[in-house]
Image (cartoon, coloured by chain):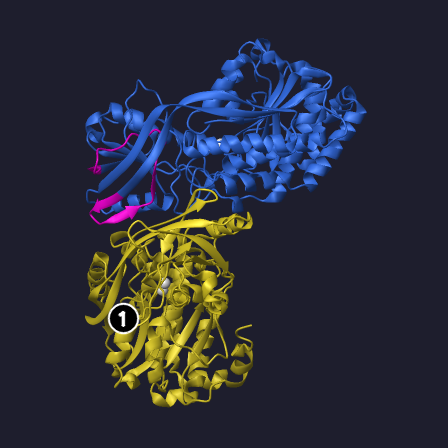
Chain colours: A blue, B yellow
Amino acid sequence: MKFPLILSLLSCAMLGSVSAQEFDPADLETARELRASALAGNGGFDVVEDLTTRVGPRLAGSPADARAVAWAEAMLLEAGFDRVWLEPATFPTWSRGHERVAVVSPVEQDFQALAIGYSPATPAGGIEAEVVMLDDLAALEAVEPEVVAGRIVFIRNRMERARDGSGYGPAVQARARGALVAADKGAAAVLIRSIGTSTNRFAHTGGMRFDTAQRRLPAAAISNPDADQLERLMGLGEPVVIHMDIDAQINEAYTSHNVIGQIDGAVLPEEIVALGAHLDSWDVGTGALDDGAGVGIVTEAARQIMALDERPDRSIQVILFAAEEIGLWGGRAWAQARAEEIGRYQVAAESDFGAGRIYAMAAKVQDSARGVIEAMAAELAPLGIELTDRRQAVGGPDFIPAAPLGLAAIDLYQDGTTYFDYHHTENDTLDKIDPEDMAQNAAAYAVLAWLSAQSPVSFGSGPALLERDED
Amino acid sequence: MKFPLILSLLSCAMLGSVSAQEFDPADLETARELRASALAGNGGFDVVEDLTTRVGPRLAGSPADARAVAWAEAMLLEAGFDRVWLEPATFPTWSRGHERVAVVSPVEQDFQALAIGYSPATPAGGIEAEVVMLDDLAALEAVEPEVVAGRIVFIRNRMERARDGSGYGPAVQARARGALVAADKGAAAVLIRSIGTSTNRFAHTGGMRFDTAQRRLPAAAISNPDADQLERLMGLGEPVVIHMDIDAQINEAYTSHNVIGQIDGAVLPEEIVALGAHLDSWDVGTGALDDGAGVGIVTEAARQIMALDERPDRSIQVILFAAEEIGLWGGRAWAQARAEEIGRYQVAAESDFGAGRIYAMAAKVQDSARGVIEAMAAELAPLGIELTDRRQAVGGPDFIPAAPLGLAAIDLYQDGTTYFDYHHTENDTLDKIDPEDMAQNAAAYAVLAWLSAQSPVSFGSGPALLERDED
Ligand SMILES: [Zn+2]
Ligand SMILES: [Zn+2]
Ligand SMILES: [Zn+2]
Ligand SMILES: [Zn+2]
C-alpha cells in the first residue's frame, strides 16, 4: 500500500487543536464558507465545458495552441484576477499526419492505432515487417539484437487499474523508451499495447522521450482489444507481418505561453500560493479530463476566493501551463525563470489527474509547517480527504522541474480508478466529467489556497527544504 | 411493458403436466442433458473467437465476405454436420472509402463519424454547409423545404437504453430514412446522432433504406459525445458550418452465399428445425457481438446435439446468412427459394442480438402446438427464461422475408441492455462477450432445437399460420 499510515486520527488527536490555533479562527471560518460555496457551485465544470467546446483539442504548437492561450487569457481576465499575463515557453513541436497499422499476414485486418508523440515518420508508403512480441521494456533491454533486427517490436505489457494510478508508471516505460531502446538494437519500428485500462477500442497516445542525440524508431500504440487480437494472431503459430505507415513531423521551435492570473495578496503580496493545471492537451479527444478538468478546478477555486469580501494575505496565482504533454516545456520554462526566487512560493499544487474525487493529501513543507498542514487537513477531512504521511509531494507534473529548487508542494490525490480509461484517447470528452466531483475538487483547492495564503508560518520553499530527512 | 402476461406460472399449472406428456420422457431427459452439457461448454465462444480472429470484419461483398464463407463452410464441416452446402444470394454492395466530418465555423473541430451504409459519396473535396438541427425524422418530415434547402440536416434523436432494445426502433428511423426524406426537401446532406446507447466516442454505422428509385443524400452518423458537442456549438448562437467529405461506392451485383449445415433427422428427415445467425458484419469492429456471437451460439447448440448418441427425429439446420446488415439479402434469397416448401420448416429461430443472456421466449405456432411450446418452456425455465404471451415471433431478422409464407418461429429474447453500446461500431470486438452468457444461449438453443425436432406435433408452418387470430 502506498500510504500505509493515515495520520489524520492519530495526529489530529495529538496536535489538531494546537495547530488549529495557529490559524486565525476567522480564517478557518472563511475556509469552511469557501468549502461550502465551492461544493454548491458549478463554475469549474462551466470552465472546462467552455474550453472543450470553443477550443477543443489543443496540441502544443498546433494552431489550437494559440487559440487556447487567447481563450485562457480572456477567461482569467473575465474571472476577475487582478493581473493576467503570459510567459513564454519554447519547444520543438510534433504533429501527427496519419497512422495506419494493419496486419497483412496470416490474415488481413486493420488496427486502431495512434502514433506516439515525437515518433518519426516511416518511409513513405510505410514499412512491412514481421512482429516480435516482448513482455515489457526490460525484456526489450535484455533481448539479443539479432532477435529484433529489422522487425517490428510489439511490447505487450498491460497497465493495471488502481485508484492511485500506480499501474501507469511501470507500464508507461514501454511508451517512453521503447522506441529508443529498440533503435539501438536495430529494430524497424515499435508497437505497444496502449497504456490504458479500458477495453474500449481506443488507442492511447502519449509522448516518448525526446532527446535529439538519440535515434528513435517510428512507434505507435494500438488499442487494448487490438493488442489482444495481435496476441491471438501470434498464437496461431504463423509469422505475423504488419504494415505500419506513420506520417508525422517534428517542427522548428515554437513559442507558446504559460498563462498566469494573480489575486494580489493584501499583507504579503510578494509571497505566492501557486495553483497549476496545464492548458495544452493531446490532439485526440477534447482534453476534457486531461487537463481541462484541472483548468476548471483551479480557476474555480481562485474564483471562490475572489468572491470573498476579503483578500487573502498572500497572493494566489493560477498558472495554466503550456506544452505539458510533450515534455513539461511550460513547467521547465516556469522553473527556469524562478531559479532565484523560489523562496517567494509558499506552496505549489497542480490538478492534473482528471476529475475524480480527492481522497488524500500529502505535503512537502518544512517541519515547522506540519502543524498548519494538519490544521488544513482537518478542514479538508469533511470532503473525504485524509492526510497521508508522505512527505514527497511534488505538486504535480509541471512543478517537477522546480522540485530541485526546493519548491514546497501539496499533492491532492484524486481517485484515478477510471482516469486511464480515457487518458490520451479520442474518448477524453466532456461527458466523462461528473460536475459534482469537479465541485469537490474545487472546494479542496479553494481551502488549500486560502489557508496556505493565510498561514501564520512559511512552508519553507528553498534549498533547505531539499535537506529535510526524507522518510 | 412489452410482455404483460407471463404465462409460465398460470399455464404450467393448468397444462404443464399434460403437455409434458406429449413429449417422450426420454426426449425430455435428453433435453436436460443437452442443457447441462451446453452450459458447461465453451464451444460457442471458441467459434466466435476463431471467426473474429481469422476473418475479422466481413462486410457483405468485400474481399472478407468470401473469406468468411470459406471459413464457415470449413467450420461446419469440421463440426460434423452431415451435409454442408452454399446457396447463392445476390445483392448490390456498398463500400466505404473514407468519411470526414469537421466543424469549420465558429470553431474548428473534427468529429468521429461513420458514413451510413448505401450513402452516396459527396462531390470530391466534400461539401460545406450550415447545419439545421431537427429533433427526429418526424420533424424532418414536417419541416418546410426552404428551412433545410442546401443545408446539412442534423437529426439529434437519442436512443434510449432498454433490456429489450425497444429504444432502437424509434431512433433508427433517422438512419434508415433521413437521407431519403431530406433529399426530397433539397437538403445537402444528413448527419445523425449515432443510434447507440454509449457515451464512448464511437460512431455507429448501419444501413439506410436502399431503393434505386429514390434519391439519397450523403449521410453519416457522429458519435454521441460529438452529437452533444454539436448541440453545444449550436447553442453558442452563431451559424455552425460543417465540412463533410464522404467517399463511398455502390457496386455491381455481388453473389455471396448462405452457408448451411444439416444434421439429418432419423425419423422425419424432410422436416427441418432451422437455427439461424448471420455471417456478415459491418466493416468496423470485428463483428463479435453482431453477429459472431449468433454464429457461435447456434453452431454450438447443433454441436451439442451432434455429440448425442442418438439422432434427432427431424433434421436440424444451421443457416449462416449472407448480407444481413445491408438489407437482409441472404434472408430474402432463402425465403424466395422456399416459397413452395415452407411447410417443411418445423420452426425457425435466429440468434442476432449479441451475447447477453436469454430471459424470455415467444412462439408463433399453430394453437395445437401451444402445449408443446409450454413443455419446452418448462425445460428453458431453469435457464431463467420465461414464456411470454406474445404470438408474433418472427424468429429473427433473416427470417422476416419468410414471415409472409407463414413460417413458424420462436424468438428467444436476449438481454440487450448493453448491446447498443457496441452495435455497428469499431468497438464490437471479442472482449465484449462473456463466455458464460454464450453458454447459456447455446444451452437454450440446444433445448429449443432438440425438442422442436422431437415434438409429437407439427408447429404448423404454412399459410394457415397467417390466419390465426392474432392477439
Ligand atoms: Zn495531464
Ligand atoms: Zn496527459
Ligand atoms: Zn445482426
Ligand atoms: Zn447489425
| Position in image of residue B356 (x %, y %) | 44, 61
Residue at horizontal 48 percent and vertical 62 percent from the top: B147
Mark 1 crowdedness (10 Å alpha carbons): few <14, some 14-19, many ≥20? many
Magenta segment boundaries in residue numbering: A102-130
Residue at horizontal 30 percent and vertical 43 percent from the top: A231
Q: SS at mark 1?
A: helix
Left or right: A371 in relation to B138 = right
Q: Which residue is nearer to you in this view: B105 or B471?
A: B105
Residue at horizontal 39 percent and vertical 30 percent from the top: A207
Q: Is residue A377 above or below residue B260?
A: above
Which residue appears farthest toward the front when viewing the image? B146
Q: Quadrant of residue B152?
A: bottom left
Residue at horizontal 28 percent and vertical 36 percent from the top: A246
| Position in image of residue A323 (x %, y %) | 45, 27
Q: Is residue A336 above or below residue A430?
A: above
Residue B34: tell me if it is visible.
Answer: yes
Left or right: B214 in relation to B238 = left
Amino acid, disc 1: Gly
| Position in image of residue A100 (x %, y %) | 28, 42
What is the tally of numbered marks visible in this picture? 1
Q: Which residue is nearer to you in this view: A465 or B252?
A: B252
Residue B427: tell me if it is visible.
Answer: no
| Position in image of residue A146 (x %, y %) | 19, 27
For residue A216: magenta? no
Q: Quarter holding the N terminus of chain A?
A: top right
